[in-house]
Image: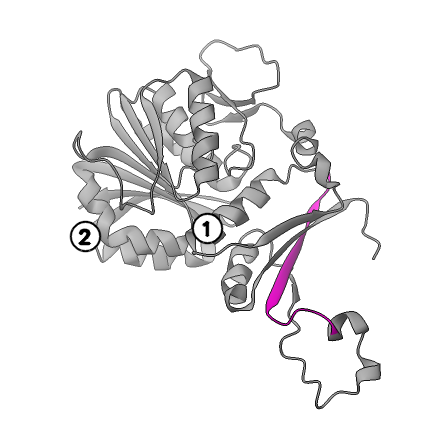
Amino acid sequence: MEYCKDWSQLKVTVKLEHLDTLVAIMSMLNNNLMIEDFSDIDLKTCYGDLIDESILNADKTVAAVSIFLPADRPFTDAVAFVRERMSESGFEGNVEIIGVSEEDWANSWKAYYKPLHIGKKMVIVPAWEKYEEKPGEIIVRMDPGMAFGTGTHETTRLVIELLETYTKKGSRVLDVGCGSGILAICAAKLGAAECKAYDIDPVAVRVARENIKDSGEENVTCDVSDLLKQVDLSGGKYDLVCANIVADIIIRMAPDVGSYMKDDAVLLASGIITERAEEVIDALLAQGLRVTDRLDDNGWCALVVQKA
């Protein structure tokens, strides 16, 4: 098959039982999906010579979902987003970028990842880029590798913008589903005294730890945790909690997150597609939390949530 030189195909293959969840995850990136599922082909009612041989021989126990991304845009966030969301949902899949040679995966996107200004003073700078800092700017250097969080995705930008407002000097910050560690590092540079970051994906934790080390922020740590199960409370509850995940996971953690928050604490919940915002808000309200602010950008939203 010939692929348009201006597009790259992101294809994810999973076991058939995970197809519906994968469709939901991929639709968060793009609603134009190509789904390959040959399990419902009934060979008893079809004439074999009318069916392509590749379909007849296809593995009926797996299915694939593809989206098409502009070839001149970095695809690392999309790949990492899908991998992390699959991990959070309890399954794995084979991720392919078709139209980009496999050996270029780690480096080809770097050409399009440039310094990014967010909010009033945050500047996310790729680790390999030279950048001359301007007065009043706060520089965060990142090499996201294959972890989600370069600052280019709407969900990450929304939370960083909110962090400028809600990070207080000397506060304790918890980042659940930290990806590359970008939010915890930003909070530390904005004056937080202690930042605890967690992710279910060991690859993300490894990347985050490398970024934390390179940032020079000694008050940031990162560990593996399934949501809030292994979160450290030895130092007390948190002043600020970040959860840049997805709607389903935020709904799942809603009953527990309040027990990790001080009475005047704030939760920044992001990764929510606009269509599901009210569902997430209802789940938070049901737990005695209240939404005090909301930011929207290109079909995504971030919520500012406080204990009632």
Residue depicted at x 40% and y 25% = 185
Q: Name above or below for residue 266 compared with residue 41.
A: above
Place residue 217 in its image quadrant. top left
Q: Amino acid at mark 2?
A: Gly
Q: Amino acid at mark 1?
A: Ser
The segment highlighted magenta reads: 57-72
Count neighbours of disc 2 (C-alpha within 10 A) and say few if under 14, some if 14 to 19, many if 20 or more: few
Q: Name above or below for residue 52 compared with residue 200.
A: below
Nearer to us in this view, 47 or 303: 47
Q: Which residue is mark 1?
A: 87
Marks counted in the figure total 2
Place residue 223 in its image quadrant. top left
In-image side of 123 versus 190 (left or right)? right
* Gap between marks 1 and 2 measured at Cα: 29 Å
Is 35 contained in the magenta span? no
In the rendered image, residue 115, in percent from the top left (x then y), is placed at 58, 23
In-image side of 306 versus 9 (left or right)? left
In the rendered image, residue 73, in percent from the top left (x then y), is placed at 68, 38
Is 70 contained in the magenta span? yes
User: Can the viewer see residue 162 in this picture?
Assistant: yes
Q: Quadrant of the N terminus?
A: bottom right
Determine the secondary structure under disc 1.
helix
User: Can the viewer see residue 277 in this picture?
Assistant: no
Name the N-terminal-most of marks 1 and 2: 1
Q: Name above or below for residue 136 compared with residue 300.
A: above
Determine the secondary structure under disc 2.
loop
Q: Which mark is residue 288?
A: 2
